[in-house]
Structure formats: C-alpha cells, structure tokens
Image (spheres, rainbow, N blue to C red):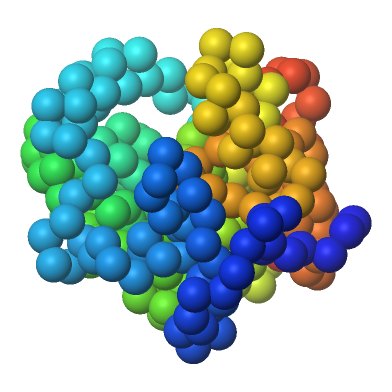
C-alpha cells in the first residue's frame, strides 16, 4: 500500500499545530481542510454540524426504515450481545444503540451532534433501556479513544466512516478501542456510491482522496481501503463482505 501523505498538488504550509500540518486548499475561495476545521469548530462549545430540522427528519427516516436483522450476523460471530460492552461509534439518532441494549448489551453512545443525542436519549426512554446506555460527551469520531479512554467487546461504526477527519487515524482509533479478543464492525459506503449523481466538486474531492490520500470534506473511501487500513494492525480474523459494489462491510477480531 502506498504511503499516506496529506498533500495537494499545489500547496503551501500555513502553520503546524502540534503534529498536525495544516495546508491551504482552496474551494470557491475558502480554505477547507478537515484538520483545520476540527480545531475551530468544537462540539463542547455548542457547535452542532447537523442542522436541527435535518437531524429530526433524518432520525425519523432512520427509525422508520431500521432493520435490526443486520445485527444478527454480528451477534452470532461474537457469541451474543448479552453482557457485552458495545461502543456505538457515530451513533446518530440511536437506533442501533437501543437495539444493542434490548439484546442485553451495555452500550456507550458516542457522536458529535447534541441534537442526535437528545433524540437518542428520548428513544432510549421510550424503549426502557436508558439504564443500559451511557451517553458519552460529544466529540469528533477521531477523538473517541482520547475522550473515552476505555476498550470494548465490540466497536460498531455504521455509515459514518466518511465523517472522520482522517481515514488513517480513524482506522487506528477504531482498532485501539477494541479490547484484546474483542471485535470491530465497520459498514461504509465506498467511493462508487452514487458517484455519478454527485457534484463535480464532490467527484474531485473523491478523486483527491482516492489517488492522493488527501481528504477534504467527507468523500467516501475507495473500495477496500478500510480493510487494508485495519490490516495494518494485528488481527486474528477479518471478514470482508464483497457483495455490494458501492459499500464495504468489515468485521475483525483483535
């Protein structure tokens, strides 16, 4: 696998903050780079990246179309959810957190959106599982290990891998959050997902991410990349579902 370098074809360094090199990338005259934005926009200061109306509409659709059978295969592989400690990483409106709790797991809900947190808390009350779900402080996905400082029997990341600041760093975060002999699950759309329906800007950012490992905004990762990133670390087993051309589904045992 080629080295991971966060560079644009034409760039100049603005400044270095800790171990983060911040480069100037122009899109419509604005500087756009995930690392820089994550330093500026902080959820603990009240910032929420998900507009209120969108959050409620998306949550309604997510709960209406929720198919709990997706968890059946995971439950079989890991030997059941009863008594397991599960991290729902990027938990959104909480449908998976609630289902894990209903199946006997002790769940940690983690996300960046205060609106989603409120929705998820209300759903946990509705299904009488509030005592089985811990709602962690809000934070970026990439910050989860630093904020939570614990490991889990299962780390579950569904549909939001693209919202990480850095794919490389986030893969390591997921791996580090899994306890020894525990499991990680990642489901993500890949760069083939509806790519012809997207804007030229999104297609360019997808190309930059795929060819140069430059992530600006939230492009989906190329097919197979997430599995390769996880395989940089010691795993006992890894299951990779190739059935869907526009998405990647991975389960690994640490």
Rendering coords of residue 87 (x, y %): 42, 56
Image position of 62 (left or right of 154): left
Q: Residue furthest right?
A: 1
Q: Is residue 166 left or right of residue 102?
A: right
Find residue 174 and report its image quarter: bottom right
Could you tell me if residue 168 is visible in this image? no
- Work out whether residue 53 can be spotted: yes
The answer to whether residue 248 is left or right of residue 16 is: right
| Residue 246, quarter of the rendered image | top right
Residue 66 sits above or below residue 216 on the image: above
Viewer-closest of 91 and 209: 209
Residue sitting at x 14%, y 43%:
115
Who is closer to the viewer here, 107 or 56? 56
Q: Position of residue 83 (x, y in %)?
A: 42, 57
Image quarter hosting the N terminus: bottom right
Vertical arrangement, residue 251 with respect to residue 235, above or below: above
């Amino acid at each position: 696998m080629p080295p991971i370098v966060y560079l644009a074809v034409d760039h100049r360094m603005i400044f270095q903050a800790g171990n983060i090199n911040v480069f100037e990338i122009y899109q419509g005259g604005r500087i756009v780079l995930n690392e820089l934005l994550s330093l500026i926009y902080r959820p603990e200061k009240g910032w929420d990246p998900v507009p209120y109306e969108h959050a409620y509409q998306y949550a309604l659709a997510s709960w209406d179309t929720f198919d709990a059978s997706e968890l059946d295969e995971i439950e079989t592989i890991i030997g059941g959810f009863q008594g397991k400690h599960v991290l729902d990483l990027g938990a959104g409106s909480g449908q998976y957190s609630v289902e894990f709790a209903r199946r006997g797991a002790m769940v940690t809900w983690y996300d960046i959106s205060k609106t989603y947190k409120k929705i998820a808390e209300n759903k946990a009350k509705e299904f009488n599982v509030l005592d089985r779900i811990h709602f962690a402080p809000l934070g970026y996905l990439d910050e989860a290990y630093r904020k939570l400082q614990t490991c889990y029997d299962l780390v579950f990341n569904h549909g939001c891998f693209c919202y990480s600041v850095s794919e490389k760093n986030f893969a390591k975060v997921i791996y580090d959050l899994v306890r020894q002999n525990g499991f990680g699950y990642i489901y993500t759309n890949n760069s083939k997902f509806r790519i012809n329906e997207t804007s030229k800007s999104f297609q360019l950012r997808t190309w930059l991410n795929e060819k140069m490992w430059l992530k600006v905004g939230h492009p989906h990762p190329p097919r197979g990349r997430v599995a390769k990133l996880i395989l940089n670390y010691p795993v006992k087993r890894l299951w990779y579902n190739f059935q869907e051309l526009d998405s990647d589904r991975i389960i690994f045992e640490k």
